[in-house]
Image (cartoon, rainbow, N blue to C red):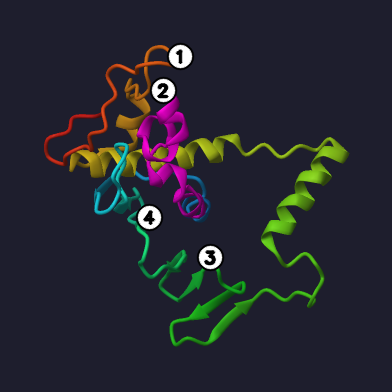
Amino acid sequence: MEYMLRNWINFTWLSGDLLCEQFIHEIDLMSWFNGDVPPTRARATGGRARRETGDVYDFFSVEYEYENGFRAHCTARQINGCDNMNEVLIFGTKGWANCRGGQGEIFNLDGSTAWKYERAENDGLSNAFVLEHVRLVSAIRTGKTVNDVEEQVLSTVLGIMGREAAYTGKFVTYDEVMASQQRLGPETFQFGPVPGIAEEIQLPGVAVRI
């Protein structure tokens, strides 16, 4: 148990794998853009190229399908020595936007700027990490708390959808995840041996999870 707790990021029952542990923020942006309406199903691929401990993958590619026809393609990896970028690109019929790492702009299809967020230089409030703390402190001082529990839970559910689709190699629906009785952790939480949890990765086409 102590080994697993110290190595928590590499065990699905503790971290949820990288879609829930790290990529959750990009999934959260996807949900925000779609008005927090869940996708109907997910399909995915994934695997393990470099990790040596635990039972998680180190790369995923997931496609979420929505009832209105919208589709989102999400890729993520945690592998040292690779080139990296962090972007959330939204493409529409009239243009596109980068919702992560951009400068607050919406672009026309020809690349020209359709809209740009105007802000004062060096106002101290252009950094998202500063803004979230301003809102937190303001909520505490005024008593007007921010409750985004439902949004956070939805993003976690979508992370689980993508993970289970990759683990099994099957389409996984939102309804299946919500109805699932799956339990990943041990029956009891105590130091010592942890029966039933092995350092074995799930094999697509073989694993039965949901």
Q: Which residue is mark 2?
A: 1
Residue visible at 80% across and 41% down in the picture: 139
Range covered by the magenta-colored residues: 1-29
> How far separated are the C-alphas under marks 4 and 3?
21 Å
Q: Which mark is residue 190?
A: 1
Query: Which callout, 4 or 3, points to the residue nearer the camera?
Result: 4
Q: Is residue 17 shown in magenta? A: yes
- The answer to which image quadrant residue 52 occupies is top left
Q: Residues within 10 Å of mark 1 (few under 14, many from 20)?
A: few
Q: Main secondary structure of the magenta part?
A: helix
Q: Earlier in the sequence, mark 4 or mark 1?
A: 4
Query: Which callout, 4 or 1, points to the residue nearer the camera?
Result: 1
> How far separated are the C-alphas under marks 4 and 1?
30 Å
> How far separated are the C-alphas under marks 1 and 2?
7 Å
Q: Secondary structure at mark 1?
A: loop
Query: Which callout, 3 or 2, points to the residue nearer the camera?
Result: 2
> How far separated are the C-alphas under marks 3 and 2?
39 Å
In front: 183, or 53? 53
Q: Which residue is mark 3?
A: 99
Q: Is residue 4 shown in magenta? A: yes
Q: Secondary structure at mark 2?
A: loop
Q: Which residue is mark 4?
A: 78
Q: Earlier in the sequence, mark 1 or mark 3?
A: 3
Q: Which mark is residue 87?
A: none
Q: Earlier in the sequence, mark 4 or mark 3?
A: 4
Q: Secondary structure at mark 3?
A: loop
Q: Is residue 110 above or below residue 163?
A: below
